[in-house]
Image: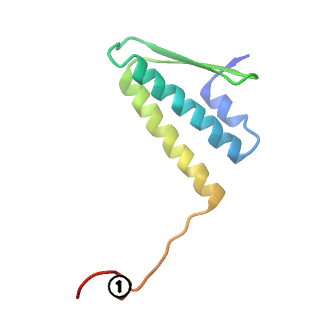
Amino acid sequence: MVCTETIYIQSASSIQDRIARLDQIITALELRMIDNSENLNIEEYRINDGQIQIQTEYQDLDNIQKAIFGYERLKEKYINKLNGRGMVLRPWQGLNRFY
């Protein structure tokens, strides 16, 4: 069964699975950029995880870079949803500054 990246990510059963699938897609796109960095024709890549095959085409390297950036942002969103976000507040006197 051949599907798109969107269906592949949406069909994950948990957030951890979505993060793992995003990692696979990002890795495949990065490898495609490294392999064919001088060739600016239509780029295609395939991922086969044993159950599903993904096949996607990009017109040039800029589109691949934009896709990687978008998938990394989406991955960070899922990581934040899984782990939560936090912020630490400290007094300014605790910083190692010489005042």
Q: Residue at x 40, y 23 (%)?
A: 34
Element at label 1: helix
Q: Quadrant of the N terminus?
A: top right
Query: Whole-percent x and y of residue 99?
Result: 23, 88
- Vertical placement of 81 versus 10: above or below? below
Answer with the quarter of the image where residue 47 lies: top right
* Picture colour scheme: rainbow
Pointer 1 residue: 92
- Vertical placement of 87 versus 66: above or below? below
Answer with the quarter of the image where residue 2 lies: top right
Query: Whole-percent x and y of residue 76?
Result: 54, 49
Query: Whole-percent x and y of residue 18?
Result: 66, 41
Q: Residue at x 67, y 30 (%)?
A: 8
Q: Amino acid at mark 1?
A: Trp
Alpha-carbon neighbours of circle 1 within 10 Å: few (<14), some, or many (≥20)? few
Query: Whole-percent x and y of residue 51?
Result: 76, 23
Q: Residue at x 54, y 18 (%)?
A: 45
